[in-house]
Amino acid sequence: MLHNGASFCASLSRQKTVTAICQAITGWIEQGELSHNDRLPAERMLSEQFTTTRITLREALGQLEAQGLIYREERRGWFVSPPRIVYNPLTRSHFHAMVREQGRVPATEVLDAGEITTPAPICTHLALPTGSRVYCIRRVRRIDGRAVLYVEHYLNPGYFPAILQEDLTSSLTELYANHYGIHYGKVRFAMLPTTFPLAASQALKLADNSPALFITRINRDQHGRIIDCDLEYWRYDTLHINVEAQ
C-alpha cells in the first residue's frame, strides 16, 4: 500500500508539473514573448528552467503539440505554430486561392510525377480495374515558406493526356479547366487523424510519429465521372475546419 501511495503521489506531482509547463509556455505565446515560428528554448534549458526531467518536459510538449500550439522539426527543435488556415472542404476553391484569400503566401513543390501501376485501394477509389495504369503526382505545399502538406494525386490518364508535361507546380484545378475543359463536380471527402507516413515526414522534415490530418478526396467532374483521387497529409496545426451546410 505504501508503495502504491508513493507512486500515486509521484504521478500527481508529475501531472502538476506538466500542467505548469503547459500553462507557462502558453502564456509566453499569448503574451507575445514567443511569436509564430519562433523556436522554443532547447529541451535541456527548459528542463532546467522548470526543474524537471526530460521525460516530464516531453509529456508537456506533446500535449501542446496535440493542441496545435507548437510543432517539432527533426533535429531543429520545437517551434510556435503559425495561425491556422480556415478550410471549408465543401468549397471548390484550390490551395493557392484559399491561402491567398487569407493573406498568406502559397507555394508548391513537385517531388516527382509519372505513370504507375495503381495500388489496389487507389483502383477502388478511381473505379478502375485492378492493375490499371494511372498518373501519380507527389507534391509538397507551403504556406509562408513553411511546408504544411504532403499530397499524392492519382489521375485517370484517359482524361488528362500529356498532363505530366505541364507545369505541375500550378493549381491542378486551373490546369484541368484551362487545358482539358474539366471542372470539379461532386467530391467524396474523408478525414482521419493519424501520424505521417515515412515519405511524408521526410518530405516535410518532421520528426517520426508527428501528428497529421489525413484527408482523402475522390473527385468527379461536371459530368459525374471519377477523374482523380488525392491523398493529403496535413500538419496537424495547419487547418481550422469550418463547414456550413445548407
Image (cartoon, helix red, strand yellow):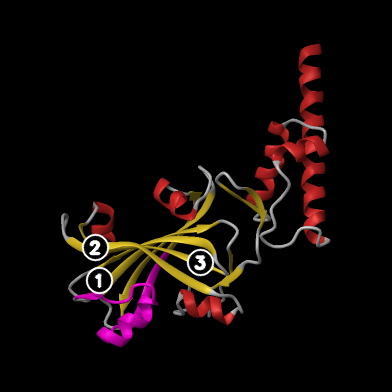
* Residue 166 on the magenta segment: yes
| Structural distance between the alpha carbons of marks 3 and 1 | 21 Å
Between 73 and 186, the residue placed more toward the observer is 73
Residue 134, percent from left and from top = 21, 63
Q: Is residue 235 above or below residue 91?
A: above
Q: Secondary structure at mark 3?
A: strand
207 on left or right of 133: right
Look at 46% across and 80% down and name the residue there.
93
The amino acid type of the residue labelled 3 equals Arg
Q: Residue at label 3?
A: 142
The answer to whether mark 1 and mark 2 are in CB contact below 8 A is yes
100 on left or right of 11: left
9 on left or right of 44: right
Q: Which residues are magenta?
A: 162-189
Q: Is residue 213 above or below residue 220?
A: above
Q: Residue at label 1?
A: 164
Q: Residue at label 2?
A: 114
Q: How many tags in the picture?
A: 3
Q: Secondary structure at mark 1?
A: helix
Q: Which mark sits nearer the N-terminus, 1 or 2? A: 2
The amino acid type of the residue labelled 1 equals Leu
Between 76 and 243, the residue placed more toward the observer is 76
| Structural distance between the alpha carbons of marks 2 and 3 | 22 Å
The answer to whether mark 3 and mark 1 are in CB contact below 8 A is no
The amino acid type of the residue labelled 2 equals Gly
Look at 44% across and 49% down and name the residue there.
202
Q: Secondary structure at mark 2?
A: strand
Q: Which mark sits nearer the N-terminus, 2 or 3? A: 2
Binning the other alpha carbons within 10 Å of mark 1 as few (below 14), some (14 to 19) or many (20 upward) gives some
| Structural distance between the alpha carbons of marks 1 and 2 | 7 Å
- Res. 1 visible in picture: no
Examine the image and state in which quarter residue 135 appears.
Answer: bottom left
